[in-house]
Amino acid sequence: MVTETGELAEAMEIARRHYAGLDGARLIVALAVERAEELRERDDAERRALEELIGSSSYPGGYLEELREEWPE
């Protein structure tokens, strides 16, 4: 059960313009699904940004092999 506060009533009124023909319950579901998709996109963007940062301070490929070649045996 959801209590229709002023904020929810306003959100549903805005959503009705985009989801014509949906009743109250289906309208809330549509809003929740749309918001979840937005959050998923944000999470994906943050994950991609972190992946780029994680590798930004790494040593270049072959670095360890080159370093080992310099070590005396």
Image (spheres, grey):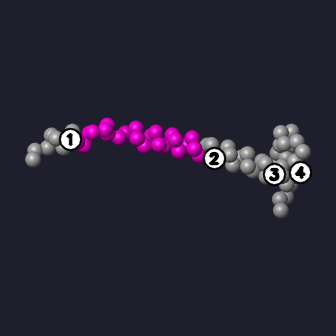
Q: Is residue 39 left or right of residue 58?
A: right
The tag earlier along the polypeptide, 3 or 4, is 4
Give the residue drawn at x 90%, y 45%: 21
Tag on residue 28? Answer: 3
Q: Secondary structure under badge 2?
A: helix
Q: Are marks 4 and 2 in contact (CB under 8 Å)?
A: no
How crowded is the residue under tag 1: few (<14 C-alpha within 10 Å), some, or many (20+)?
A: few
Give the residue furthest to the bottom.
1
Q: Position of residue 69 (x, y in %)?
A: 16, 41
In terms of image quadrants, where is residue 20? top right
Q: Amino acid at mark 1?
A: Leu
CA–CA distance between discs 1 and 3? 60 Å
CA–CA distance between discs 4 and 2? 26 Å
Tag on residue 67? Answer: 1
The tag earlier along the polypeptide, 4 or 2, is 4
The answer to whether residue 48 is magenta is yes
Q: What range of the chain is rendered magenta?
A: 43-65
Q: Is residue 2 left or right of residue 49?
A: right
Q: Are marks 1 and 2 in contact (CB under 8 Å)?
A: no
Give the residue drawn at x 75%, y 50%: 32
Residue beneath disc 4: 23
Give the residue drawn at x 15%, y 40%: 70
Q: Is residue 72 left or right of residue 44?
A: left
Q: Is residue 25 left or right of residue 54?
A: right
Residue beneath disc 2: 40
